Image: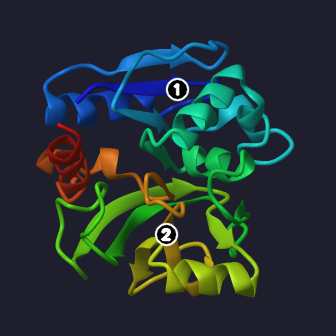
Amino acid sequence: MKSAIIVFPGSNRDRDMVMALRQASGSDPAMVWHKETELPDVDIIVVPGGFSYGDYLRAGAMGALSPAMRTVRERADRGVPVLGVCNGFQILTEIGLLPGALMRNAGLKFVCKTVQLKVESAQTLFTSGYSDGQVITVPVAHNDGNYFADAATLDRLEDRGQVAFRYVGSNPNGSQRDIAGIYNDTKTVLGLMPHPENAIEALHGGTDGRGLFDGLVRSLH
């Protein structure tokens, strides 16, 4: 599986994502600086976590204007899978690849903890490494992870099976309907707030994130 990671000033989970993709696929992803307009021919593009441009204006707003993101959108429109994690999720909503917005956490504080997620369906290229309804444990680390959309959009996401992951037991940020991650209409774009790339080593507290990356490799091989 060939992959590329978009790197912004302020990215801080790009190297973690390198390790996760390397472990799963056996090869290093291409690192693409956000000012580039050309991307290599890859099977998946990842927009990593961090604080692109220091979250000035609002989280993901300035990162969404980077030249590389125009190319990411073009590739996504052609069906190339895109994964956005945390700040990457925020950026994907800002460029319109995913509906809704990520607002300030309900508690108005940065949240850094492990959470439990329910895998809504294992029938996608991103979740094929799990089983339907499986509960996994992964970390979150964000200040603006409160997913918001209008009622009609939320109903549409539910009806079309576009909710990918849902918080169970405890909602860390106030997200509507406990939503932790969503897909686009074709389920080729996934945005999620938790960090599966930080749950691939037992010494770091757990390996539940491996299923996402191992499933991607099998689906895109």
Residue under numbered circle 2: 180
In the rendered image, the quadrant that contains the N terminus is top left
Q: Residue at x 32, y 61 (%)?
A: 138
Q: Residue at x 38, y 70 (%)?
A: 115
Residue 106 place in picture, x, y as percent:
70, 75
Q: Relative to 55, is 4 on the left or the right?
A: left
Q: Relative to 68, is 194 on the left or the right?
A: left
| Disc marking residue 6 | 1
Badge 1: how crowded within 10 Å, few (<14), some, or many (20+)?
Answer: many
Q: Label 1 amino acid?
A: Ile
Q: Secondary structure at mark 1?
A: strand
Measured along the vertical axis of the image, is residue 167 above or below residue 216? Answer: below
- The answer to whether any part of residue 206 appears in the image is no
Measured along the vertical axis of the image, is residue 213 above or below residue 117? Answer: above
Q: Relative to 197, is 65 on the left or the right?
A: right
Residue 67 place in picture, x, y as percent:
71, 21
Residue 68 place in picture, x, y as percent:
63, 23
Please report whichever mark, 1 or 2, sits nearer to the chain's N-terminal start. 1
